Image: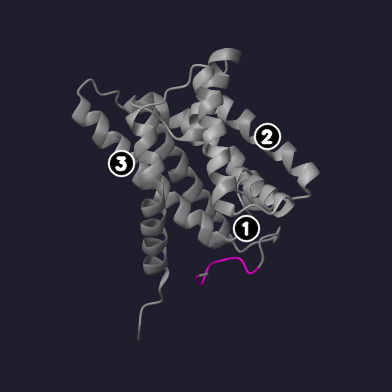
Amino acid sequence: MVSWSSAHPLNLQPRAVTLVLLCFGLAVFGIGEAFLIAAGIGVSPWTVFAQGIGLVSGLSIGWATFAVSVAVLLLWIPLRQTPGLGTILNAVIVSVAIELSLPYLPEPELAIYSFLEATAGILLVGLGSGFYLMAHLGAGPRDGLMTGLQRRTGYPIAWVRTSLEIAAVACGWLLGGTVGLGTLMFAFGIGPAVSMGIYAVKHLSQQPEG
């Protein structure tokens, strides 16, 4: 929690600064995902799934990401999860950011540039996550699915999260999504990237002394 965080995740009338920084963070998150897609060496697990859905349905990656988010939110109903404002904005803004930014990003031919672009994408996702988490306006669609399943099954949260990520990758890969080095980089790098993002946001949010 920082000075601009919402006091409650189900707050439907947050302060303007909270809403603006939440939207900024989600946009950065989506642009980070677009960097990974443009790098062409593998994407995050749920984007693999969205890519597969897009290939089968003919939807663009942005619209496919939105469709996956809506489908995941529907799974919240039997789990009795309650979405917050951040949950809805997550589904919309991340998808729009991917859709709008992807055409302007380079698609490197050299492996080293692809690696650097994927790394930049992971760092941006981590930074965006820092803003989004600090806003405290509700879990994202996939995070809510994870916590709902954990509550219903009683399994450790790590098992539930890992199972969901593996299922998303497997289904997406079978549908034609891109799995590769970038996917592994995301799997091992997103934890540290989010930690750095949270630290950066906390540092930037500190009130100046004096």
Name the amino acid, label 1: Leu
**What distance separates the C-alpha of mark 3 from that of mark 1?**
26 Å
Residue 198 percent location from the top left of the image: 42, 61
Whichever of callouts 2 and 1 sits on the residue coming sooner in the sequence is: 2
Q: Is residue 33 above or below residue 125?
A: above
Q: Is residue 78 above or below residue 137?
A: above
Q: Is residue 135 visible?
A: yes
Q: Is residue 168 left or right of residue 101?
A: right
Q: Is residue 152 left or right of residue 27?
A: right
- Say which residue appears at 60% left-offset and 38% top-offset: 92
- Say which residue appears at 71% left-offset and 49% top-offset: 153
- Magenta range: 2-7
Q: Residues within 10 Å of mark 2 (few under 14, many from 20)?
A: some
Residue 102 percent location from the top left of the image: 41, 28
Query: Dominant secondary structure of the magenta stretch?
Result: loop
**What distance separates the C-alpha of mark 2 from that of mark 3?**
27 Å
